[in-house]
Image (cartoon, grey):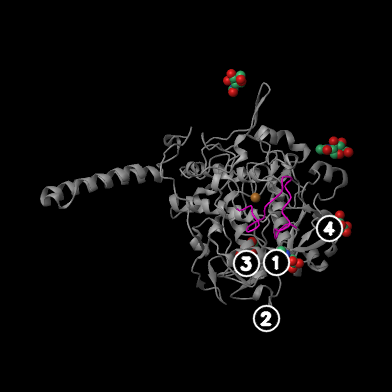
Amino acid sequence: MKALGLLIVLVVIFSRGDAQFPRVCISDDLLEIKECCPIPQGFTEPCGGPGRGHCNDTHIPDVENSVRINEYEVDDRRRWPTVFFGRTCACEGNFMGYDCTRCIWGYSGDDCSIKQKPAVRKNILNLNDEERSKFQRYFNNTKYTTSDFVYALEFKENIRGSQDFASLSVWDFFMATHYYASRATMPPASAEICKEKNECFLDFAHEGVGFPTWHRAYVLEFERAVQEVNDDSDWTLPYWDWSAAEDNQCDICTNDYVGKNDPDGNLDTGSVFANWETICVDLPSFDEATNRTHTKPCNVTEGTGKLKRNPGNADTDSLGESMARLPYTTEVDFALRFSTYDTPPYGRISDCSFRNLLEGYADTSTGKNRQTTTNGTVTVPGAHTLHNHVHIYLDGTMSDVPSAANDPIFFLHHCNVDRLFETWIRRYGTNDLINNQPETGASPGHSRNEYIVPIFPPYSHATIFKRSTELGYDYQELHEEGTDGGSDMGECGVAAQSGVSPRVIGMAVGITLGLVLLAVAVVLFILYGPKMPPRQVEDTGTEMSVQT
Ligand SMILES: *[C@@H]1O[C@H](CO)[C@@H](O)[C@H](O)[C@H]1NC(C)=O
Ligand SMILES: *[C@@H]1O[C@H](CO)[C@@H](O)[C@H](O)[C@H]1NC(C)=O
Ligand SMILES: *[C@@H]1O[C@H](CO)[C@@H](O)[C@H](O)[C@H]1NC(C)=O
Ligand SMILES: *[C@@H]1O[C@H](CO)[C@@H](O)[C@H](O)[C@H]1NC(C)=O
Ligand SMILES: *[C@@H]1O[C@H](CO)[C@@H](O)[C@H](O)[C@H]1NC(C)=O
Ligand SMILES: [Cu+2]
């Protein structure tokens, strides 16, 4: 099984030429004129017409990136989605979607004017039997229902017409979307430049400041797709709070949830997901697949075998002892002490950054990035914490990030990652939340005004950096700091942070409040004697200064 543990660090999956678009826009004519402005059902004009939407040139945000994107001249994801479509629906008001028939997140109703009461995403362990089997059935239906979107089988430069787009299931469409956004190596000519910057790849979803918002949008789109497949708009995705798992082992790897497995990492035949066929697993590397044959590495219509999962069996020799267990809740507490959302260069080497701790390239004891190093014959594994840690711990399909979304546990994991992101927002967020995201200087696709590639038609990271209640959903419970109320920030002392953190303000307010309460209590005590027992007052004061 250890051989299956394709490491996140080592995987270099390339996927530059594919894309996914509404089936209605993949006629030879529309591909030729590069226009995707369908007339919605029941309407007479493209994009619905005045009051709903109109067809317009696709606006592309002009952003300066730290990696020179034009060096990736063959990558179809650049200036998304204009390599395929230069004219798309510009929706008005609260409408969105490729034909402006959807409502923006958080709104519903025929004219999308009703602000939704937030739908609550529950802890998967709190689902009752009926809800649990519903989650399994709904996921399974999503795997076996054909998507309205199709997927380009070839690089744009090789696309001849509609015959080069494939139909796939709704589940596999999401799988392919994540795969398409993930890591691609740099063209050989630029390899030297990028090596210096430690950024020899293009990844629109990972290793960057856009990681939390990219996956937030992705999970929202997925949740809505599952609702649509199952005709149940009230359904919500459950989250898996892995940091609370008993004995720090996978507590949902049973047939009641995502399926148990044998010692070789095969799912039990009693699991709903045992027969699911994966796509895009164990593909040849980019260089081999594209340089020799100039063909896309992943043919999404070809299965690549059954799901594999083997929690706790990742190769601890090369990856570190901690990979035999799930992350501790104290590691989550640690990450959530960082009020600084992200730090330059907004990538995998960022230090003292909440985003990098959550994504998992920063150590949860120092707060700093650590790459794999060698000291003599001893290899010190790079930091893989929280989000990354869970992927690696689960081993098998989940440990290869670009194709990890084959496994149903992926969405339960990412729902929890989003819940931790939301915990950060509620703890440190102010009215100008998006200012936590850089306007320039991130790697391509990660700055605040850039699009979440390859959502079509796209919207920016900034539009999704809001409290979840603004987007129409909430969590049963956010992450609560453990009772130790620690203040350890490793090698990233509070002083190293820019500005005064809300935490410090909170502490000051707490202490002041405690002192005021104490003073009031003393006065009351003097005035009214033993009616107000002083012991209780002392307790209140102590508790406050510990907690804040
Ligand atoms: C159409 O797109 C152009 C170019 O992006 C933009 O300047 C213009 O404001 C858009 N028109 C409308 C009505 O949205
Ligand atoms: C999953 O759905 C497929 C297609 O509808 C069906 O054949 C299969 O029995 C379902 N699996 C389970 C375990 O319900
Ligand atoms: C690409 O192919 C050319 C010609 O076969 C070869 O010289 C070159 O080394 C290959 N590049 C990579 C990165 O494999
Ligand atoms: C993709 O796989 C299908 C099924 O095996 C095959 O018919 C098709 O030719 C393949 N397409 C490409 C572009 O390789
Ligand atoms: C390298 O290993 C030696 C011997 O185990 C140890 O004394 C030294 O501190 C290590 N150096 C670093 C930088 O970890
Ligand atoms: Cu991902």
Q: Nearer the viewer, mark 1 or mark 2?
A: 1
Locate ligand 2 by image quadrant: bottom right
Residue 26, image x, y percentages: 78, 66
Q: What residue sits right under mark 4 in the picture?
A: 159
The answer to whether any part of residue 438 appears in the image is: no
Q: CA distance from mark 1 to mark 2?
A: 28 Å
Q: Residue 124 appears in which quarter of the rendering? A: bottom right
Residues at circles 3 and 4 in contact by the CB criterion of under 8 Å: no
- Counting residues from the N terminus, which is met first, the one under dot 3 or under dot 1? 3
Q: What residue sits right under mark 1 in the picture?
A: 141
Residue 493, image x, y percentages: 44, 34
Q: Nearer the viewer, mark 2 or mark 3?
A: 3
Name the element at disc 1. Answer: helix
Of residues 96 and 130, which is closer to you in this image? 130
Quarter in which the N terminus is drawn: top right
Q: CA distance from mark 3 to mark 4?
A: 40 Å
Q: Residue at x 43, y 53 (%)?
A: 430
Q: Which residues are magenta?
A: 252-274
Residue 526, image x, y percentages: 12, 47
Amino acid type, label 4: Ile
Q: CA distance from mark 3 to mark 1?
A: 10 Å
| Mark 2 closeness class: few <14, some 14–19, many ≥20 residues within 10 Å | few
Q: What residue sits right under mark 2 in the picture?
A: 42
8 shown above or below 414: above
The answer to whether any part of residue 47 appears in the image is: yes
- Counting residues from the N terminus, which is met first, the one under dot 3 or under dot 4? 3
Q: What residue sits right under mark 3 in the picture?
A: 134
Amino acid type, label 1: Asn
